[in-house]
Image: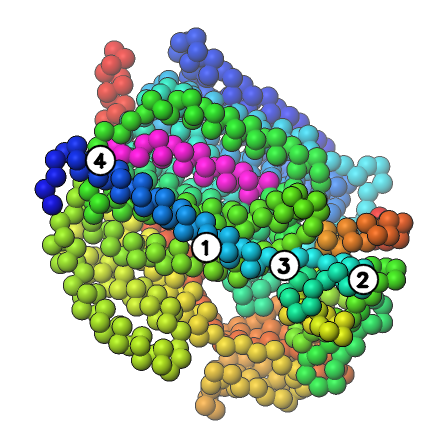
């Protein structure tokens, strides 16, 4: 392992460059793979009703929890509720577990889970932010895009 | 009247920070010693004004002055005193005032403890810090003035502090975090100042090191406290969520860790100089990016402050100016910097290089995951996605495993080259242990226990054993720096051990319970005794009582609560736990699901405290390095030289 001064210097540089290139290429490929597999698209109630959302794939759905729609199971922690975009589109969500503190009827929520054949969304996770004035941006957008006027009425009623 | 004083002194502070940005730099430009020396006195004035302004806000909170809009939105007359004070940094405006105050505090510290710097250098550094302070204070004044009044019609009582924030964790978590974020402005300013002179020498790296270590140690405390707070206050037992805002604090930490290591090589061996400068710039840029992500509302997060587009645009412009400006300067000047030192593949330099590469890749992967939803929305014209924790776990964990292996070997490597004998001598226990471990792992794979977990645990124990042996060998700890380094490394090993054991062996269940019901988990029996109403200073609570036993022996009585804060109309879960070094027994009350039935979450989490214990150990290590005599002694030497050459 005796090398000349220049030579070992050059060899080091080569080693380092090769290492960097390999590491960068490997890391990028791996990262993009992982990223591709773990992004969750958001679908509004209207998109789900129109059948645009894929079945059996983890996606996010959200909307306003409809008044009077929360039904609890007699046994265990099962619960089902309906989210809507405040007009016609409605999606039933089923969940097994503890709902977040800020979950309540009339609140904007987001659920992570899968859409099943019968149009029911089975959630693994339900998110509601810890602030009564807060509406998830996705939900706000879903309301705004499709039903401008009702969303604005909603905003006025809640924010002012 | 008091809020107006506060506002007025904020305006004066803007003036002074502009003066700090301009005058010393002008002095350098004109070679005017008098102007160059104005820095420290302006920095003192700036700090005093901001401290006064901050005190005015604290006073308004204590006095319940609801004519001040910020107080009215974030406080209430029934709020306990300590939370009235911490409510000052409970929302955007006040927390940014704290941020600015801390920035001026670091500036003052630089002015006071910089005898090692030449007049010229000190003036340049203070000017850069002045520019940053001016940016911060003008942001406060123009977009988020905490002293805005609700006049003439102000509410009789305030809207109360978000109940999540009414907690000890929040009293200390943001100040520590900001000390870290803003502290990275010091190495940043020094890097920029050095670039403008074009001379990067060992003195520069030596001078940067204690400041970087201090900022980094504060950030470590901040992140650790944040994780702990999340665990008992909002996480239902989780301690890290890969939430955008957590990532915002984690990225500067990772980059700062790389910077610390790279600075060591730059100081001791004069290598990686321009790389180190780039790291210093990146670290602070990531701090600013974090502030942007949290305060502009572009990302959804449990932590994000209220959305206001003007604020977002202001920070974005500031961010672009700071990052763009410093990178331009870097591109222009750094090509002149050369490192003329060689090292072998097994030298400490090479180890530090590996450390840096891995940390930068780790940071980049977190950055990508954090910003990808934004990118995606722009590219696909409004389609919204979220990047889930599985992405971060898949990408981040392997990198950390590699880092961990490097960490085990590197403290025993030598500068220039490490003879293989030395490595063998240090590591023979592990070389012996490896075949044993392989047999063990094979056995375990057959019986189905997590392999990676076993591997990482073995490595963690190995690192701790090596460090402990190093410790006991007489005379091998030569300085506070080395002691600090070893403590920090041990802390990382402890934290990682905690993470792995907690993830692998934790048990948890969500169950529906009626009074009298019992559930058993990991050998513990939880009996639900019932629920009673409790009244707090500003809330009403349903307090449950659980009797926890193990093999019939009493372990603890746990009283988790479901609180209703009447002013904020918020419901809060207050978990209760029986903490222990080896395990936490955790109970949280969910919703009421029947007439007398409640949803209940129970957890038994082994080693979970090790995560935060490790974090604190890391921070302690960082602080201990500050005691190193070398920084002080050599500082005096350098200043003697300066006096000598000046005379």
Q: Is residue B345 above or below residue B473?
A: above
If you read the primary sequence from the N terminus, does the residue marked by circle 2 or circle 4 appear first?
A: 4
Q: Position of residue B206 (x, y in %)?
A: 30, 33
Cα separation between marks 2 and 1: 35 Å
Q: CA distance from mark 2 to mark 4?
A: 63 Å
The residue that label 4 is drawn on is A10
Query: Around disc 4, counting alpha carbons within 10 Å, would you say few (fewer than 14), some (14 to 19), or many (20 or more)?
Result: few
Q: Chain of mark 4?
A: A
Is disc 3 surrounded by few (<14), some (14 to 19) or many (20+) residues within 10 Å? many
Q: Mark 1 highlights which residue? A: A30
The residue located at (31%, 77%) in the rendering is B442
Residue A40 — which label? 3
Residue B600 position within the rendered picture, expressed as x and y whole percent measured from the top left: 63, 78
Q: Dot 2 corresponds to which residue?
A: A50
Say left or right for B312 vs B622: right
**Residue at (81, 60) in percent of width and height:** A46
Tell me where the magenta segment starts and ends, as one range.
Answer: B268-292
Q: Are marks 3 and 2 in contact (CB under 8 Å)?
A: no
């Amino acid at each position: 392992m005796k090398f000349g001064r220049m030579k070992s210097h050059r060899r080091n540089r080569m080693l380092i460059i090769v290492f960097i290139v390999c590491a960068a290429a490997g890391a990028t490929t791996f990262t993009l793979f992982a990223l591709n597999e773990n992004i969750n698209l958001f679908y509004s109630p209207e998109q789900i009703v129109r059948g645009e959302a894929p079945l059996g794939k983890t996606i996010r759905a959200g909307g306003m929890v409809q008044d009077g729609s929360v039904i609890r199971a007699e046994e265990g922690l099962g619960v089902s509720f309906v989210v809507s975009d405040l007009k016609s589109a409605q999606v039933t969500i089923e969940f097994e577990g503890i709902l977040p503190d800020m979950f309540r009827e009339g609140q904007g929520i987001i659920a992570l889970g899968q859409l099943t054949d019968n149009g029911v969304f089975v959630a693994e996770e339900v998110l509601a932010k810890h602030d009564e004035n807060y509406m998830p941006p996705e939900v706000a957008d879903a309301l705004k895009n499709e039903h401008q006027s009702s969303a604005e009425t909603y905003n006025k009623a809640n924010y002012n | 009247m008091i809020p107006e004083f506060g506002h007025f002194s904020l305006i004066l502070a803007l003036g002074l920070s502009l003066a700090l940005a301009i005058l010393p730099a002008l002095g350098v430009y004109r070679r005017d010693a008098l102007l160059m020396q104005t820095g420290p006195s302006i920095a003192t004035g700036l700090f005093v004004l901001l401290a006064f302004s901050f005190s005015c806000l604290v006073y308004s909170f204590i006095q319940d002055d609801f004519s001040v809009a910020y107080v009215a939105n974030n406080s209430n007359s029934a709020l306990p005193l300590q939370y009235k004070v911490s409510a000052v940094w409970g929302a955007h405006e006040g927390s940014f005032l704290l941020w600015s105050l801390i920035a001026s505090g670091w500036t003052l510290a630089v002015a006071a403890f910089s005898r090692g710097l030449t007049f010229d250098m000190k003036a340049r550094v203070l000017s850069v810090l002045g520019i940053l302070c001016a940016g911060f204070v003008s942001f406060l004044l123009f977009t988020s003035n905490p002293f805005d009044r609700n006049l003439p019609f102000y509410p009789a009582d305030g809207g109360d502090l978000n109940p999540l924030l009414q907690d000890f964790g929040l009293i200390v978590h943001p100040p520590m975090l900001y000390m870290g974020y803003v502290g990275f402005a010091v190495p940043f300013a020094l890097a920029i100042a050095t670039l403008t002179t074009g001379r990067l020498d060992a003195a520069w790296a030596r001078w940067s090191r204690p400041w970087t270590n201090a900022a980094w140690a504060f950030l470590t405390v901040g992140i650790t406290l944040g994780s702990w707070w999340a665990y008992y206050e909002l996480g239902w037992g989780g301690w890290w969520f890969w939430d955008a805002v957590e990532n915002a604090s984690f990225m500067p930490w990772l980059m700062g860790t790389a910077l610390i290591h790279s600075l060591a090589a730059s100081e001791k061996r004069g290598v990686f100089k321009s790389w180190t400068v780039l790291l210093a710039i990146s670290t602070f840029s990531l701090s600013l990016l974090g502030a942007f992500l949290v305060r502009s509302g572009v990302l959804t997060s449990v932590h994000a402050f209220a959305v206001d587009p003007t604020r977002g645009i202001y920070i974005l412009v500031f961010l672009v100016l700071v990052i763009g400006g410093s990178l331009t300067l870097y591109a222009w000047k750094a090509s002149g910097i050369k490192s003329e030192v060689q090292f072998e593949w097994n030298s400490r330099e090479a180890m530090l290089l590996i450390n840096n590469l891995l940390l930068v890749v780790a940071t980049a992967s977190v950055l990508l995951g954090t910003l990808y939803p934004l990118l995606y929305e722009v590219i696909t014209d409004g389609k919204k996605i979220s990047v889930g924790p599985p992405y971060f776990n898949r990408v981040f964990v392997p990198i950390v495993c590699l880092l961990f292996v490097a960490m085990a070997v590197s403290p025993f490597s030598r500068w220039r080259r490490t003879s293989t004998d030395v490595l063998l001598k240090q590591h023979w226990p592990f070389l012996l242990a490896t075949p044993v471990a392989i047999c063990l792992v094979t056995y375990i794979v057959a019986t189905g226990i997590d392999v990676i977990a076993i591997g990482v645990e073995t490595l963690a124990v190995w690192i701790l054993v090596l460090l402990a042996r190093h410790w006991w060998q007489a005379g091998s700890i030569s300085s506070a720096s080395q002691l600090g380094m070893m403590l920090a490394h041990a802390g990382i090993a402890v934290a990682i051990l905690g993470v792995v054991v907690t993830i692998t062996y934790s048990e948890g269940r969500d169950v529906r319970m009626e009074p009298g019901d019992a559930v058993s988990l990991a050998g513990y029996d939880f009996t639900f005794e019932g629920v009673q109403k409790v009244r707090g200073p500003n809330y009403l609570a349903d307090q449950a009582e659980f009797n926890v036993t193990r093999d019939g022996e009493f372990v603890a009585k746990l009283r988790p609560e479901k609180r209703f804060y009447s002013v904020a109309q918020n419901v809060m879960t207050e978990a209760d736990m029986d903490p222990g070094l080896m395990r936490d027994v955790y109970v949280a009350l969910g919703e009421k699901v029947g007439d007398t039935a409640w949803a209940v979450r129970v957890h038994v989490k082994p080693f979970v405290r090790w995560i935060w214990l490790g974090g604190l150990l890391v921070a302690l290590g960082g602080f201990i390095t500050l005691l190193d005599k070398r920084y002080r002694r050599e500082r005096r030497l350098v200043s003697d030289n300066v006096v000598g050459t000046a005379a």
